[in-house]
Amino acid sequence: MAAVDGGEVDHLAGERATAHFDVDAMKVAWAGSRHAVEVNDRMARLVASDPVFRKDTRTMLSRKELFKDTLKKAAHAWKRIVELRLTEEEANLLRLYVDQPGYVDLHWGMFVPAIKGQGTEEQQKKWVPMAYKFQIIGCYAQTELGHGSNVQGLETTATFDPNTDEFVVHSPTLTSSKWWPGGLGKASTHAVVYARLITQGKDYGIHGFIVQLRSLDDHSPLPGITLGDIGGKFGSGAYNSMDNGVLRFDHVRIPRDQMLMRLSQVTREGKYVHSDVPKQLLYGTMVYVRQTIVADASKALSRAVCIAVRYSAIRKQFGSQAGGPETQVLNYKTQQSRLFPLLASAYAYRFVGEWLKWLYTDVMQKLEAKDYSTLPEAHACTAGLKSVTTSATADAIEECRKLCGGHGYLNSSGLPELFAVYVPACTYEGDNVVLLLQVARFLMKTVSQLASGKQPVGTTAYMGNIQYLMQCKSAVNTAGDWLNPAAIKEVFEARALRMAVNCAQNISKAPSQEEGFSELSPDLLESAVAHVQLIIVTKFFEKLQQDIIGHGVKEQLQNLCNIYALFLLHKHLGDFLSTGCITPKQGALANEQLGRLYAQVRPNAVALVDAFDYTDHYLSSVLGRYDGDVYPALYAEAWKDPLNETVIPDGYQEHLRPLLKQQLKFSRL
Ligand SMILES: CC/C=C\C/C=C\C/C=C\C/C=C\C/C=C\C/C=C\CCCCC(=O)SCCNC(=O)CCNC(=O)[C@H](O)C(C)(C)COP(=O)(O)OP(=O)(O)OC[C@H]1O[C@@H](n2cnc3c(N)ncnc32)[C@H](O)[C@@H]1OP(=O)(O)O
Ligand SMILES: Cc1cc2nc3c(=O)[nH]c(=O)nc-3n(C[C@H](O)[C@H](O)[C@H](O)COP(=O)(O)OP(=O)(O)OC[C@H]3O[C@@H](n4cnc5c(N)ncnc54)[C@H](O)[C@@H]3O)c2cc1C
């Protein structure tokens, strides 16, 4: 089904006619199943056809108007969810297509998962139904003004008082003010607050507590609680719809049973008891969200790429001979070499996100069975993939803006807002550098265990092949040899392992492990990136082994997979050469093959972005319209700007007229 929201003429019809594959089948490959295509399509259209969910004037609203609009949309979304008795899957998609960050993201995305993951059965029975019915609104209050990345450094205290069977929650310093939690500033009634647990005079470190913040009668802050929004953020519209907040506690008392007690407990007498589970399970909500952020990266990236590909097919510049038509900018090789790797990355992230969701579910099942062995790998994979995919996506959205020339800079292109709303993903849920250093730590541990003969498993299993990978040389002889998945995998594995081993060797020369790790941290980051890129490439190849149906679909995905891998090889050529995995000649052959692959993608480019199945409402871009009727839309959009409400601007009488009519003259003139 086409995703036109009402266009009459299809200016991209010629582009669509050149596709060599079945677009509907590609939609299934992208979405994961025919059911997923159907439900996505239905929810996207439901949102697009509802006037309350309009967002075309969002960037022109003041902060207060925007926030109120967000409250209205969230309430209306909930009303529709209840009226239509939507399933959880449908409701999540409806919220996604409403496409306006707001308190509900944190309520469903972190508050509920934190209680489910860290609360006892009894606590879940009490709190989850209230949250599910929106009788309470919750947020995730971890970060403080002075401490974000370093969770162990948080300062808020929760001191047990055995006399009253309560915890006293307190912010002892300015820097201990909770700062950033989304939904906290204005909307939430409750929060899961992370604080240092102190009982019987001893500090037991960070634990989670459910704290009521606002009255359920009139929404005013409860005694001892100071609350507010932390202020305007980057860009117009964008993440300013979210009330990221500040919170201070002045000796606020909560019942003992509001400590989340699944992992550890405080008894009535104040005795601290830690269950026989890894302490890191406290970080479980972050692992869960990092996994969803990887899936979201492919959404944001595919949106930007869809806009840039469609517009590049419409936009013409130069090349006209004797008055003939100009050239579509999509035909320029430079445009292709900038854009097609991003198209390939969108597909790569979609499939690795699918795999990560599987890994997460698998780890959760193992945890239920008290098998904690895969926890470190789950942490490394979620941290690493969150980091690599969000950094690349943020850069890619900005690249798409440039690929759309001047018009990409207009809010009506949709790209400035998409960039502004997306770029904090590099910071929230763990700064990307901090998370990559966690991956590096995991890699160094794995390398150090190789000597003792311990066989690495999962995504580090390749390291077990150390004898071969440390000395192998790529056998690629022609550009076409780079189409062999084994040839690509071998050099990616060798590069990742050699970089990790180099780091480990250099660390071992330092006076201490800690000093070595710190000194080598820039190299460790690159080593972590190499490992994560290997995972993404491998999972794309594994996807191609699955049953992929539809005329030409597998061939297109194969091309995209090769583009993704060879583009990375070209971009990180220094790594591959300096570790001796390939020769300069082989690097040049990879680039030659890349050019051939771009030529194969060119006739399919528009159809490949159509397969994302985005409505014009979701894209909210005049440049990315399904019908390609860009110029009338751009022209019409300009007149909607508040500045054009009057012909003579406000301020003319006070500031322009006196200037133009001034009597004062420079004496020199
Ligand atoms: C136009 C458009 C308009 C609208 C468009 C709308 C949408 C656009 C599209 C997309 C939007 C994108 C996404 C939206 C989706 C969701 C996002 C919504 C909102 C954002 C929410 C953000 C919420 C937050 O940010 S919450 C706060 C997050 N904070 C952090 O992440 C802090 C990071 N720090 C840490 O995690 C830890 O401090 C640390 C890991 C860095 C260090 O831990 P620690 O201090 O304990 O020290 P170590 O010694 O390093 O570790 C000890 C051992 O523990 C192991 N470890 C650490 N962490 C874990 C873990 N999580 N699990 C398991 N194990 C762990 C570590 O490896 C060590 O092990 P070892 O064996 O001892 O080595
Ligand atoms: C839009 C947005 C929404 C958010 N929502 C929430 C929320 O709902 N709940 C919540 O609790 N928090 C939230 N946060 C906070 C967020 O999780 C933190 O900002 C994030 O974890 C980064 O921590 P930080 O701000 O302390 O950065 P810092 O750690 O201060 O980072 C500053 C710089 O120092 C570097 N750095 C830090 N440590 C190291 C190190 N060990 N080695 C090398 N370099 C280092 C970083 O790479 C970075 O360049 C949100 C943040 C944003 C931007």
Image: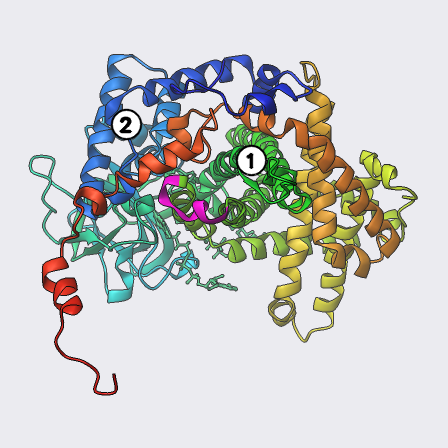
Q: Nearer the viewer, residue 168 or 31?
A: 31
| Farthest front residue in view | 322
- Whether 410 is among the magenta residues is yes
Q: Amino acid at mark 1?
A: Val
Q: Is residue 497 above or below residue 551?
A: below
C-alpha span from label 2 to label 1: 26 Å
Q: Nearer the viewer, residue 386 or 303?
A: 303
Q: How many marks?
A: 2
Q: Can residue 608 be seen here?
A: yes
To which quarter of the image does residue 331 belong?
A: top right
Q: In the drawing, what numbered circle is on residue 53?
A: 2
- Whether 494 is among the magenta residues is no
The magenta segment is: 405-412
Residue at 47% in and 47% down: 279
Q: Position of residue 272 (x, y in %)?
A: 35, 49
Q: In the drawing, what numbered circle is on residue 309?
A: 1
Q: Amino acid at mark 2?
A: Phe
SS assignment at label 2? helix
Mark with earlier residue (2, 1)? 2
